[in-house]
Amino acid sequence: MLPASLASLRNYVDGEFVTTERQFDNISPLHGRLLGRVHEADAALVDRAVQAARKALEGPWGRSTVDERAAWLHKVADVIERRFDEFVAAEVADTGRPVTQARNLDVFRAIANLRTFADLGKVAHGECFESRTAQGEALLNYTVRKPLGVVASISPWNLPILSMTWKAAPALICGNTLVVKPSEETPSSATLLAEAFHEAGVPPGVFNLVHGFGANSAGAAMSAHPGIDGITFTGESRTGSTIMKAVADGVKEVSFELGGKNAAIVFADCDFEAAVEGVLRSSFANTGQVCLCSERVYVERPIFERFVQALKAGAEKLRIGYPDEPGVDMGSLISHKHRAKVLSYFKLAVEEGATVVTGGGIPHFGDERDDGAFIQPTIWTGLPDTARCVREEVFGPVCHIAPFDTEEEVVRRANDSNYGLAGTLWTTNLQRAHRVARQFDTGIVWVNTWYVRDLRTPFGGTKLSGLGREGGRWSLDFYSEVSNICIKVG
């Protein structure tokens, strides 16, 4: 059950929960019913949030030690852990995802993000070099980290609490202050996160939450605000481009994790059952609403027909339904608007000549779920690599499967994309695994697995999939200004 505070989702600025006159509805994608009313922040409230963040940066938070900041992040994590079921309920209500995913991925990772970066911050170190000038003078050069400043963080709707804490934790451990905006589609867990910061006693102004939309709303106000020192954004490539243009004149730091049209390559020497299960997961997890999903699947010709039939059988066994139903595999899409977009690609694929192996429509339940945003997992074959449905990100439970004959050919086809976020490789040949993985033009490559990694490793994309790297020390680098101090010692 949702906490009572989520019936009226407020902003959180300078340590206080703030209501506004302008509000919008938070609608459940499961059955179309009203979940709560969201208080939309205007430019004036965004300005208040930025000023509060600046004041905290110049106050006690800016003078705090890394150990003190780590202790606060651990306290926030402890609050989330204590209110675990409330965060799960918020994620499920806003997104329609299965409870098992919300428990085992979303909220679990939120806690892990806060604790991991708190601990990483405490052991982060600079560099030190001794050198001599041409005249023989001894020099000591060392680096120190300073906060980037006031950071604006804009999070997506597909993994709300995971993404928000993934950005907040490293920013805060580095001594920055934050103004965050969740997607208008998923305001609930972000509001609970503000409550967690408040309950943990984090000083006012350190973490500020504003609700709203992009253009002509809170998002645009954050991007254009002169008091923002850096922006981190996860979402559509087109929105990332708009933000980059907005901050260009100020030459501000930006980190973008954008879209993907990811390829999975399945070689004939793979563990067949493991590859089928892996591609099922990488294509249909979270109803396909993960930027890392495999929408393009290339299968070596000797096992192509067998693989298509096995994936079809697996997709048709996926159970679609209420998030708390035992054994449910897929929930709804995020909204009817997004479903209309995905369905338009289903229609386009047929027009482009695709063979629909399975799916392609809307499931019917005969109950209130028919008012939700549910959709069938869908598999296509028969399209050329030039087809729009093979080149453009659908962001739904869909994949196109195509045969290939040689390693050189499939690497070229996999890299022939405007995106470069992730790649997946299925083979039992160790030499091939290392050789092909290095040739992917992507930020991350999985071999015989998908969607697992150590939080200390870098994450980000190439081309239209993003700019910069976060994760581990790469996050600490982005959220810090690094200065060199050179001292003459002799």
Image: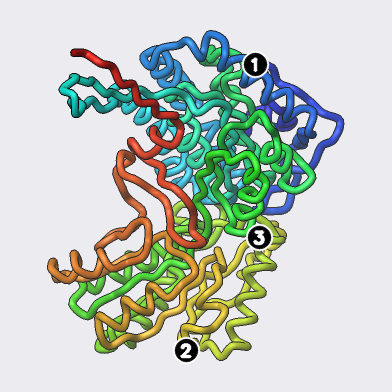
**Residue at x 41% of width, y 46% of height:** 469
- Which residue has dot 3 on it? 373
First in sequence: mark 2 vs mark 3: 3
Residue 382 is tagged as 2
**Residue at x 41% of width, y 42% of height:** 470
List x then y, in percent, for residue 154: 60, 41
Q: Is residue 145 visible?
A: yes
- Which residue has dot 1 on it? 15
**Residue at x 72% of width, y 28% of height:** 10
Q: Amino acid at mark 1?
A: Gly
**Residue at x 60% of width, y 86% of height:** 350
**Could you say which is closer to the camera, residue 311 or residue 59?**
59
Local crowd size for mark 1, using a 10 Å CA cut-off: few (<14), some (14–19), many (≥20):
many
List x then y, in percent, for residue 405: 27, 88
Q: Is residue 274 visible?
A: no
Disc 3 to disc 1, C-alpha distance = 36 Å
Secondary structure under tag 1 reads: loop
Horizontal arrangement in the rendering, residue 22 relative to residue 302 (left or right): right
Q: Amino acid at mark 3?
A: Ala
Are the residues flagged by discs 3 and 1 in contact, CB closer than 8 Å? no
Disc 1 to disc 2, C-alpha distance = 56 Å
